[in-house]
Each structure stands twice: as C-alpha cells, then as structure tokens.
Amino acid sequence: MVSRGSKGDRKTATLRHGFGIVEPKTSRKVEFITEEVLPFKNEFLLSFFANGKLYDRTFVFEPYSIKDENLKKVPLLDSGGVLAE
C-alpha cells in the first residue's frame, strides 16, 4: 500500500507499507495521521490479489474530511471510521 498527501504545491512524503497476507474480514492498522496533514488531500493506493487476479484501488480523503463528525460505524469491523469516497 502507498499513502501520500498533497495541498497545492505542497506534498507529504510517500509512504509504502507491506502487509503480507490479510485474512478476510480482518483489518490492519496502516499509520497514524497527524493533524498537520488533515488540510491535505490524502490518498491511499492499495494493490491486492483476489481469486488469482491483481487489483488496484485508490481511496481519497478530501481536505478536512478526516474528523470526528464524519465517523460512521463500519459493520464488518464493528468499529467506527471515516469512509473514503
């Protein structure tokens, strides 16, 4: 997985994460998001194999969208989270 953020001509460092095998209906903590990057558009690019095929997904969080007011229940994980559009 790759994570990065941008705001105009400012960019965060690009971070790369490897998780190995993640079992179905489980989760992995990716990284702590600091207050400084909340005004940025934050992107998380995920590549994964399923049924013998390689898939890519990009999850985008618009500036200031990661906040308590946007928490929703995530049924699969039985916890709260901010869902990407």
Image: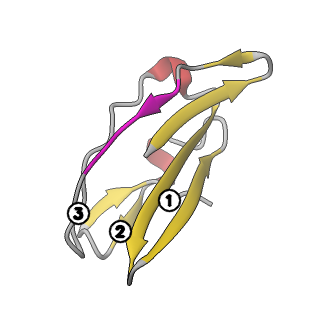
The residues bearing labels 1 and 3 have C-alpha atoms spaced at a distance of 19 Å
Tag 2–tag 1 contact (CB < 8 Å): yes
Q: Position of residue 81 (x, y in %)?
A: 38, 55
Of the residues tagged 3 and 2, which is closer to the observer? 3
Residue drawn 72% across the image and 24% down it: 7
In front here: 67 or 36? 36
- Please tell me which residue is depicted at 52% across the width and 27% down the height of the picture: 14
- Residue 72 percent across, percent down from the top left: 42, 62
Is residue 20 left or right of 54 when viewed as pictured? Answer: left
Residue visible at 55% across and 29% down in the picture: 38
Name the residue carrying label 1. Answer: 83
* Helix, strand or loop under label 1: loop
Asked whether residue 17 is drawn in magenta, I would say yes
Q: Which residue is mark 2?
A: 74
Q: Which residue is mark 3?
A: 22
Amino acid type of the residue that numbered disc 1 sits on in the rendered structure: Leu
Q: Residue furthest front?
A: 52
Few, some or many residues within 10 Å of mark 1 (<14, 14–19, 20+): some
Q: Which residues are magenta?
A: 14-19
The quadrant of the rendering that contains the C terminus is bottom right
- Amino acid type at image mark 3: Val
| Magenta segment includes 61 | no
Main secondary structure of the magenta stretch = loop
Which residue type does callout 2 highlight?
Val
Q: Residues within 10 Å of mark 3 (few under 14, many from 20)?
A: few
Determine which quarter of the picture holds residue 17.
top left
